[in-house]
Image (cartoon, rainbow, N blue to C red):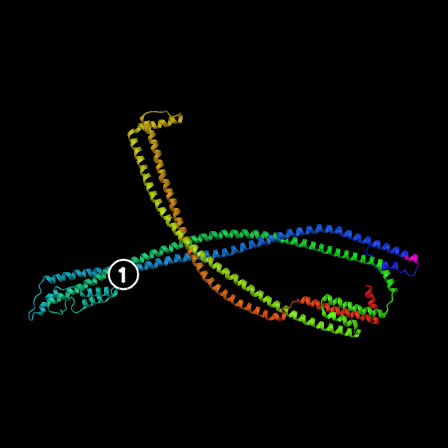
Amino acid sequence: MGRIDIAVCLLFLAPLGVQGMDQQEKGNSMIAKVISMLGEEKDKIAADIAAETKTMAEYTEWCDDTMTEHSYAIKSAVSKITDLTAVITSSTAQIAGLDEDITSLGAEIAERQAEMKEADAIRAKAHDVFIKAETEQTEMVEDLEQMMVEIKEQMNAIAVTPAPVAAEGEEEAFVQMHARHSKFDLKKMQKAMSIAVSSIWVDPESKKNLALLNSDGAFVQQGEEPVTANLDEANEEKDENMKAFEGLKGKADEALQRLRDEEAKKQSEHDINMMTIKQAVALNENDLDDSKRERARIAQEKHEAEEELAETEAAKAADEKALKSVTAECTAAADAWAKRQSEAKAEQAAIEKAKEILSSRVTVLVQVQQKTRDVDSINRQTRGKLVQHFRNLGNRLHSLAMLNLVSVVSSDPMAQVKGLLNSLIEKLTKEAKEAADLHEFCKAEKEKTSAAIKKKTQTLNGLDARIETASTKKQTLEGNIADLTDEIAEMEKSQAEATALRNEEHTNFVKVTTDFTGAAEAVDDAIDALKEYYGSSFVQTNSKSTKASNAAPPVLGGAKSDSAGGIVSILETMGEEFRKTVKTANAEERAAQSAYDTMVNENAVSKGSKDAEIKGSQSEIKSLGVSIHDFEGDHKMTSKELAEVNAYVAELKPQCGGRTVPYAERKAKMDSEIEGLKNGLAILEAESPAGAFNFLQLQRN
């Protein structure tokens, strides 16, 4: 049965009061039947809703499970995508960093190699300059030595030939005789001395000696006149010049040696520099190989992560599509079910209302038509109603103003009561608006200050976190530096111990190889002695024994040559064992030396890496110190701003705070008072003839 309209039911009520008792009973019977039919329809709707509720519960459970499954898959995929993206991003950054390292290392290796080439060229050029200078200095020293020999020979010749005493008129003969014994190349000597002194030993003593040699009293050259006619005085001057010459010659020798020493020093410095550069190139090449291997590994990881990311994103897209479809389907079903329940509820309410009308409304209408009211009675009831209304309102709201109206409405004329109620409504409405405006102002200011406090607090918390993070990182870096320093010290200590152990192992190796090599040689000598003694019979017996051993078990006993053959066999075995021991020792020595060299190289690389890490950490610690200082400055400024906001909040408290009754409660009370006053006016309007009917309707309902 569909929904029954109320008008259909009222058709059965039209004959009532017009026809007789029989027709009324017949109408009542029809009404009862209609009421029964309405009840059955309501029960049927309830049964249908119950069955549909069970079905819908199962469907909803399926929706929840399916959406949960897809949502979980999507969430897992998102988490996995985030992780894979992080891996790819990290790998990309690492590859970029390694590419930079590879480029940097390649450039550094090339730079080092160019540096070696340039250093070799500079050294070769400097060596050529040295060779040329050495040749010149050597030739100069040799010239000086030759001149010294010539000078000494001439001086000796002068010393052997007595110097004649020049008589008056014989000065010219004296000079000629002296000149014959004083022939040497004075210009050549002066030139050599000038070169030696001016180019190398520019000191006061050398200049003095050179000036002495160049003075007018120096050695007399052929064709020149001596300054003094006294031969003894000339000899004395020559002795002095000879001493000065020898001093300059010693300076020249010393200059040559210093030139050679300087060349040896520069060559040594060049060799050390080249060794340092080669070690740096070797370390860089090792780092370059490591970087290339690490890049290949990270590139493979990135490729695998990208493939897995593509698969995960495809699976996520499929789950999202399925979830969207299921969600749309389940949402549509839920909306339809909500609409079905709402319509069923409305239908049941309509049926229930129709039943109520049929069972009671007609009788009430008949009774209302028979009732009459007296205007005076209405006025008395209205005043009593107002008294009771304001008394209840005052007690419920704990409002003294509403309780005061009880006495007013009990005695004052209704017109005055009505005017009073209107003025009170206007006053309370104005106060309510002012309170609402103040509340909105305080609310807005509270929101702004709260937002400012929250923002400043978050900023302070962020700065605290940054300061703490930077301080922690600084402490961590300082700890890392200490750890790295300890590790370097421990590494150096371990390497020293390994070096001592390696030296001890090498010493043992030398002893073992020497001893066992000597033992093997001794065994060879013993075998030679036995073979020499037994001769060919030993060899034949030995061969027969070998053939017999292939055909049958060996025969015990035998000739002396057989015994000697066994001894030789034992000696040969011993010799082989001795040589094998030496061979094994050599292999172990090579392996131990290789392991030691590898350890030394690895330690050098590790130490370089740790030193670089220490320098980087120290640099970062300085940067963190600057950051901490900046963060602390920002923290101080933000704290000051937060204090200013709190001060403003304190200024607002007298106006916006400190009330014992919350605004919502006060507003509810004012609204209730205004509504009570308006209800009082509505009751008051019942005094008028137009309001009497409304009052009766109010009583009915």
**Relative height, residue 195 to residue 348 (above, below):** below
In the image, 373 versus 531, the foreground residue is 373
Left or right: where does residue 696 sit relative to residue 602?
right
Q: Measuring from the top left, give residue 489's x and y in whole percent.
A: 40, 53
Left or right: where does residue 600 sit relative to residue 634?
left
Q: Which residue is mark 1?
A: 133
**Whether residue 609 is visible:** no
Q: Residues within 10 Å of mark 1 (few under 14, many from 20)?
A: some
Among the 4 quarters of the image, the one containing residue 268:
bottom left
Q: Measuring from the top left, give residue 159's x and y in whole percent.
A: 11, 62
Q: Residue at x 52, y 61 (%)?
A: 465
Where disc 1 sits, the SS reads helix
Among the 4 quarters of the image, the one containing residue 511:
top left
| Residue 561 falls inside the magenta stretch | no
Q: Measuring from the top left, give residue 121's x and y in whole percent.
A: 34, 58
Q: Residue at x 92, y 57 (%)?
A: 23
In the image, 382 versus 104, the foreground residue is 382
Among the 4 quarters of the image, the one containing residue 668:
bottom right
Q: Main secondary structure of the magenta part?
A: helix
**Whether residue 342 is visible:** yes
Q: Measuring from the top left, give residue 58's x and y in whole percent.
A: 71, 50
| Amino acid beneath label 1 | Ala
Specify the quadrant that holds the C terminus: bottom right
Left or right: where does residue 401 sit relative to residue 257?
right
Q: Residue at x 7, y 67 (%)?
A: 165
Specify the quadrant that holds the N terminus: bottom right
Number of labels in the image equals: 1
In the image, 167 versus 37, the foreground residue is 37
In the image, 15 versus 244, the foreground residue is 15
Write the start and end of the magenta stretch as one range.
20-24
